[in-house]
Image (tube, rainbow, N blue to C red):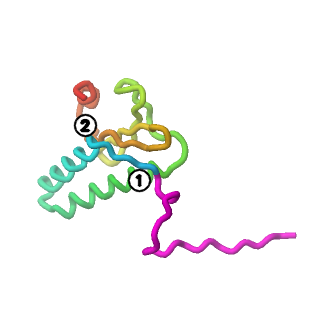
Amino acid sequence: MPTSTAPLKPRPRNSPRQVSDLPRLRMLPSAKADLVNILEYITRESGNLIIGRQFVGALRQRCRKLAALPGTLGRARPELRSDIRSVAFKSYVIFFRYVDDTFEVVNIIEGHRDIEALYKDL
């Protein structure tokens, strides 16, 4: 005998989210500083604060999406640190690690930079 299930209703836009709906994402102070630097750079180069904000917003959204995905993502980066992984986003690289049930964003760095040298200085 077939069972019928009612279609899931989408959550209204303004309804509060449940704690269980939120991915466990933590932006370390180093990643927050990187986002500020990226915002300043893109705003300066483009001459438009809106473009800078949109790009940083897209980076943040990518981090939220990564945190919400199951499994271990990205490329292991043992040459930097044993717990660091990375994912590319446009011309930037998002460096992160898993700490218990938290997705921690450690840094967001332009891909053309000498990343190994930057991590030696950290």
Mark 1 to mark 2 CA distance (whole Å): 24 Å
Look at the image and say whether residue 6 sits in the magenta stretch.
yes
- Using residue 31 as the reference point, say whether residue 99 is left or right of it: right
In the foreground, 26 or 42 = 26
In the foreground, 93 or 35 = 35
Residue denoted by label 1: 64
Q: Amino acid at mark 2?
A: His
Q: Is residue 40 above or below residue 87?
A: below
Q: Amino acid at mark 1?
A: Arg
- Residue 38 is situated, as x and y percent measured from the top left of the image, at 21, 49
Query: SS of the residue at dot 2?
Result: loop
Name the quarter where the C terminus is drawn.
top left
Q: Residue at x 30, y 58 (%)?
A: 57
- Using residue 74 as the reference point, say whether residue 54 is left or right of it: left
Decide: few, some or many residues near mark 1? Use Cα within 10 Å; few <14, some 14-19, many ≥20. some
Q: Is residue 9 above or below residue 80?
A: below
Q: Residue at x 87, y 70 (%)?
A: 1
Magenta-drawn segment: 1-23
Quarter of image, res 91: top left
Q: Earlier in the sequence, mark 1 or mark 2?
A: 1
Look at the image and say whether residue 110 sits in the magenta stretch.
no
Q: Residue at x 16, y 61 (%)?
A: 49
Marking on residue 112: 2
Secondary structure predominantly adopted by residues drawn in magenta: loop
Quarter of image, res 107: top left
Q: Is residue 4 above or below residue 46?
A: below
Q: Residue at x 44, y 31 (%)?
A: 76
